[in-house]
Image (spheres, rainbow, N blue to C red):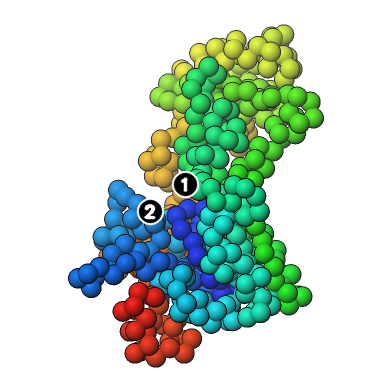
Amino acid sequence: MHLPLSGFRVISAEQYGAGPYGTMFLAQMGAEVIKIEPPGKIGEDGTRRGGGDTARHVGPHFLRENESTYFQSFNLNKKSLTLDLNSEQGQEILHRLVASSHVVANNMRGDLPARLGLTYDALKQINPAIVCAHLSAYGRDNERAKWPGYDYLMQAEAGYCQLTGEPGGEPQRMGLSMVDFMTGTIFCIGLLGALVDAQRSGKGRDVDTDLLSAAVHQTSYPAIWYMNDGDETQRTPRSAHPNATPSQMFKASDGWMFVMCQLPKFWPIMLEKIGREDMLDDPRFASNADRLANRDALTEVLDEHFSRETMAHWQELLAGFVPVAPVYELGAALDNPWLETIGMRDQVVHPDKDDLQVLASPIKLDGKRLPNRAAPLLGADSEDLLGELGYDASEIADLRSTGVI
């Protein structure tokens, strides 16, 4: 497969989730993504401890010591270069890399890119076309720049926790770190836009996004409703849509399912398919506005009907006619045979596991999903990359012994 970012080199001083999640898409599309990772400390006994992306140390499951399967979630297809960016020699290596690169990315705390020389202003004399992409918690240009921040904090401050859960219950975060994933994706949209322009103009720039801005932006239409009409969206029972009805969870005989009459046309189709055409004449449910006003009564009626049969029965009856899905637990969701049908499960070869199970890319090119390979071991590519930059074996050994790499 010819990959669209083949030939582009991305240096990324990245850790943990949001940044690595975004740059993994670049690596899957063919870019050479080089992770810069801290080399760790050399102890009195001469052994090196710690080091690497903190994600390598996140349990509970490991391939080997300090090589977690968590790390594989965000770093497929990348290379690893250990490098102390705080050292003079580390900066020299960075600059040699920048000369042959197209992007320098990072997801550091907002005050660190300038200190570590990762901004366009610091690198434009080496490579005027370099794009410097920054993903931070709160941005680089305000009084929160030095604040550390994580996904869950953004869900709290952007209103997600108060919007999630049953009415009257405690605030709840989403079950997954969706702010990280959304921000990583937005990060790469900005990065790619700047890269396209740099290829045309020969001039790079800084590109910024931050977790809180991305989280707030995703409040989307409820934000517009509130800012213009003072209409503050509230929690709804059964995770129902705030307006379209019925669009919520219902009880089948063996579990829950989500049925979405998101458009008015689906209401009569659903009633016909489930054998409840009589409800078309019920004035409580005549229009979407009526159904919304009488949602509790509608839920009771449909629960009683749907609970007579299994989720599979209703899905087979409604599929392709009315939007419907079973409410799976995570294991059932990942064991769903449909994922095999569409190719969303993949496996890669890792030094510690020949059949490491991973998720396939959601992107297809020419009808085929993007290829995957295992995330790199810490520093796996350091010697090759330094050799390419002109360092010989003795120089590399010196850099390693002094903790620069």
Dot 2 alpha-carbon crowd within 10 angstroms: few under 14, some 14 to 19, many 20 or more: some
Point 73% across, 74% down: residue: 203
- Say which quarter of the image contains residue 50: bottom left
Q: Residue 54 vs residue 6: left or right? A: left
Foreground pick, 352 / 146: 146
Viewer can see residue 274: no
Which kind of residue does numbered mark 2 sit on?
A: Tyr
Q: Which mark is residue 70?
A: 2
Q: Residue at x 50, y 33 (%)?
A: 173
- Which mark is in front, 1 or 2? 2
In the picture, the quarter occupied by the N terminus is bottom right
**Residue 338: assigned label:** 1
Kindly tell me whether residue 397 is visible in this rendering: yes
Q: Is residue 359 above or below residue 384?
A: above
Instruction: Tell me the distance, in whole angstroms, between the alpha carbons under discs 1 and 2.
Output: 24 Å
Could you tell me which residue is drawn at 40 percent across and 24 percent down? Answer: 254
Residue plotted at (68% across, 17% down): 292
Instruction: Look at the numbered discs 1 and 2 and tell me whether their residues touch, using CB distance below 8 Å.
Output: no
Is residue 190 shown above or below 331? below
Residue 367 percent coordinates (x, y): 59, 62
Q: Earlier in the sequence, mark 1 or mark 2?
A: 2
In the image, residue 306 sits, relative to residue 223, either above or below, namely above
Q: Position of residue 208 (x, y in %)?
A: 65, 57
**Residues packed near mark 1 inside 10 Å, few (<14), some (14 to 19) or many (20 plus):** few
Question: What amino acid type should be assigned to the residue bearing mark 1?
Answer: Trp
Residue 282, position as x, y percentages in the image: 69, 9
Query: Could you tell whether 54 is left or right of 5 in the image?
Result: left
Q: Does residue 199 appear left or right of residue 19 in this picture? A: right
Tell me the number on the disc at residue 18.
none
- The quarter of the rendered structure image containing the C terminus is bottom left
Q: Nearer the viewer, residue 66 or 368?
A: 66
Give the residue at the far right of this rendering: 228
